[in-house]
Amino acid sequence: MNLDLHTTSSNIHADIQISGSKSESNRLLILQQLYANLAIDNLSDSDDTHHLQAALKGNDLVADIGHAGTAMRFLTAFFATQEGQTKILQGSERMHNRPIKILVDALRQMGAQIEYIEKEGYPPLKITGAILDKSTVAINGNVSSQYISALMLIAPSLPAGLTIELLGAITSVPYINMTLALLHQLGIDAAFEGQFIHIKPLQQTDDKQLVVESDWSSASYFYSLIALSELNSTVSLSAYNETSLQGDSCLASIYQHFGVTTVFEEHRVILTKTDMGKNTPLVLDLKNAPDIAQTIAVSCFGLGIACELTGLHTLKIKETDRLEALREELTKLGADIHVTNDSLHLKASGQIKADVAIATYNDHRMAMAFAPLALKTSLTVLEAEVVTKSFRNFWNDMKKIGMHIQEH
């Protein structure tokens, strides 16, 4: 499905309901398997969460999780603990080219029985569940936080709990803290101190009902829309908390640079374009929130603002190489941009080309990050259905804010 996008007005006023955070939902679904008396409200409606649920409920030998990277990491650890159960965990072609060796090595340190079916270090995997009786493991701290969270989620179910040593620099700390906070909400004794995460065993927990906060990564596209809109444009998003577990909630402070203010009211946020923002280059280290890099880069380009974004090394192994994809697609639109293995450098520009077809590379965030540029130019988003991976109602919500969308 290819979509042509344009707008006749950049004056926005809308009220949008966004489903639960994919990051929180997927963590809680693993914990629910370990603690059956956990009830979850406002689960994400994303493809990733649907894939994870199906794999957890399914009794077949093979579990196919498509493009769902979080599901691949979390399920690898979970199935490794299911004594007497064998599972083949596979996904899309891209998933079979996303490395998982660091997590598998860590689980093998703990006694897991995991085999590579095709290529060493990559899915698909054959996992034979076993009792993991080692109580310590070491893993690099600068890898995807999903590897670390995968270990944290199974830790309280292990006979002696688990101490995780993080080697070297630690990135994506907010996602580690999110996992830690969810463990705390279940009454699990867990601490993150220096280079170590200590999690004690807990066989059962009291009845709990947890409500998943809406996804801040999904909110990022509305921040971009308001940044690119006319003065006094506003959008209300629900349901959000001012004290959020999600690292991407840093959007509220980052988008002040673009003249967007954030007001919290009764589990919702109201975004308003209050001034023209700053024309000075935006310099950010996004090691703790890499998923919003694409949105920020597109916002800067649309406003003619230079940016220097660093801490992006994990973007190389996402659904696509997001740094190269950004360079390619922004260049089509007239940007002067270059990228390295962990950074993006965009020069200020005053011209945006029209009628450009944006490739999405099977990456949901590419489609959604570029959509707000329809406030500045006409463009086509190729394979636009990819948004269902994390935000099923995205295109309907774009229509609510006044965007004209035509399928061809």
Image (spheres, helix red, strand yellow):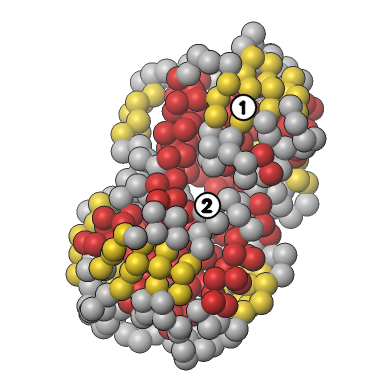
Q: Which mark is residue 331?
A: none
Secondary element under disc 2, as helix, strand or loop, is loop
Towards the viewer: 59 or 272: 59
Question: As displayed, is residue 323 above or below residue 140?
Answer: below
Mark 1 or mark 2, earlier in chain: 1
The structure residue drawn at horizontal position 49% and vertical position 23%, both measured from the top left corner, is 56
Q: Residue furthest front?
A: 408
The structure residue drawn at horizontal position 44% and vertical position 28%, both measured from the top left corner, is 53
Residue 84 drawn at (x, y percent): 64, 8
C-alpha distance separating marks 1 and 2:
20 Å
- Horizontal side of residue 226 vs 64, given as left or right: left
Q: Which mark is residue 89?
A: 1
Question: As displayed, is residue 283 above or below residue 223?
Answer: below
The three-letter code of the residue at mark 2 reads Asn
Q: Which residue lies under the disc numbered 2?
A: 362
Contact check, label 1 and label 2, Cβ < 8 Å: no
Q: Residue furthest top?
A: 84
- Horizontal side of residue 101 vs 20, given as left or right: right
Question: As displayed, is residue 151 above or below residue 388?
Answer: above
The structure residue drawn at horizontal position 42% and vertical position 18%, both measured from the top left corner, is 36
The three-letter code of the residue at mark 1 reads Leu
- Assess disc 2: are there few (<14), some (14-19) or many (≥20) residues with their C-alpha within 10 Å of its C-alpha: some
- Assess disc 1: are there few (<14), some (14-19) or many (≥20) residues with their C-alpha within 10 Å of its C-alpha: many
Towards the viewer: 240 or 25: 25
Residue 404 drawn at (x, y percent): 25, 68
Residue 386 drawn at (x, y percent): 44, 50
Nearer the observer: mark 1 or 2; the answer is 2
Residue 239 is at least partly visible in this image: yes
State the quadrant of the C terminus.
bottom left
Name which quarter of the figure residue 237 lies in.
bottom left
Instruction: Count the marks.
Output: 2
Residue 258 is at least partly visible in this image: no
